[in-house]
Amino acid sequence: MFNNNTIQRFNDTETPFYYYDMDVLRNTLDACRDASSKYGFHVHYAMKANFNPKVVDMIQSFGFGADCVSGNEVKAAIEHGFDKEKVVFAGVGKSDKEINLALDANIFCFNVESVQELEIINDLAKAKNKVAGIAIRINPNVDAHTHHFITTGLDENKFGINTWQLNDVAETLRKCDNLKFLGIHFHIGSQITDMEVYRNLCTRINEMQDWFENHGFTIKILNTGGGLGVDYYNPDTNGIADFESYFKVFSKFLNVKPGQEVHFELGRAMVAQSASLISRVLYVKNGQKKNFLILDAGMTELMRPMLYQAYHAIENLSKQLAVGSGQSEQENHSPVSTHHSTIKYDVVGPICESTDCFRKDVDLPQSYRGDLIAIRTAGAYGEVMASGYNLRDHVQSIYSE
């Protein structure tokens, strides 16, 4: 991903920062659009994954819709030119203010997660003399086989409506004149790479579709959610998610009836590989049992490793530059190390928290103060989760030329 000219550019830029490779993003979006259009599927970009303005603008230019989980995401999607007929508002805790904003924007659909929410949206729509399109988010009780913090489709969690509540849903829908039932919605988790999980989801969607139709409801939209994972271990050799296999599973196992649309809400798979967090080594601490690389980036710039114990590939770009330019160790740094030797480092940040660690026991070439470090596959849930804890400066972004 990084040639020597790019690394040299990094040398001249204050760290830490996010680097976006717009060619990687463009190629990923091409692959997603090609694979989904083969089956006539509709893809909505999950705004929560990354709302960097240049990233969002490129995604919008491909004609994708927007999946939003806050009022401000709805507002941003419309400001960035997404067709309001392709904007969906999900989220377990929509406030009245957010619902009213979305109603005023005339968005396509609310994904509703409780019986009480149905009643609230109906009342707010009635006050505006409007009819709100809605889909019911159902927990299919399908195990996503992913980290328990990002599993969302099992029974008895805060998301969605459980199957034993469906009779109440049906009764409420029949009473709410300011709601238009469009379909059913599912989301079982994130970073899923096992396609058998999606096959199981299709089985449950088919069952739920039959339930609603048997109770007198016509389904226009089958919204399968998202969750397709990416390869965090091999970002260069496997840089585009397996969109082909993903959409093929739904084409093969989902019972799509004439006139129905199949919708997807993809975030991570569309943006994760397009960005890396670039940092610099502030200090090297060598101990008896542990060696530490202390970077100028930390949990305030990339929270995922601390929040989910998530893996990110970590690379020493200064060493790559030295090797690529034929520069010797002596020219690159004052200490001289054994050629091709590696050392295990705990790669940590500067934040005053013990959890501020990107990874432990990382095999890297011997590293020095000032070395550039790349933390890969950081385009999803990276910049958007950055914080000002410790009164840190907001992380900046630069883009490929």
Image: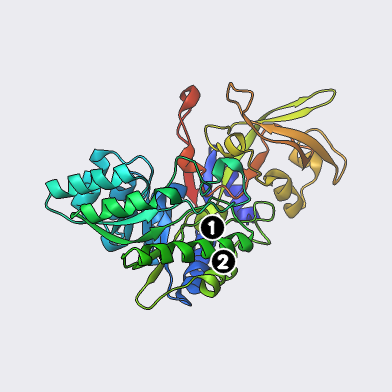
Q: Amino acid at mark 2?
A: Tyr
Residue 278, position as x, y percentages in the image: 59, 42
Tell me if residue 400 can be seen: no
Q: How is the image coloured?
A: rainbow
Disc nearer the start of the sequence (1/2): 2
Label tally: 2
Residue 326, position as x, y percentages in the image: 77, 52
Q: Is residue 40 left or right of residue 74?
A: right
User: Which of these two is toward me, 259 or 21?
Assistant: 259
The residue depicted at 28 percent of the width and 38 percent of the height is: 95
Which secondary structure lies at badge 1? Answer: helix
Q: Is residue 75 left or right of residue 146?
A: left
Q: Amino acid at mark 1?
A: Ala
Residue 77, position as x, y percentages in the image: 32, 53
The residue depicted at 45 percent of the width and 42 percent of the height is: 384
Q: Is residue 173 left or right of residue 247?
A: left
Which residue does the numbered mark 2 point to in the structure image? 246
Q: Residues within 10 Å of mark 1 (few under 14, many from 20)?
A: many
User: Do tag 1 and tag 2 residues touch (Cβ < 8 Å)?
Assistant: yes
State the mark number for residue 269. Answer: 1
The residue depicted at 55 percent of the width and 36 percent of the height is: 303
Q: Is residue 200 above or below residue 393?
A: below
Q: Nearer the viewer, mark 1 or mark 2?
A: 2
- Quarter of the N terminus within the rendering: bottom right
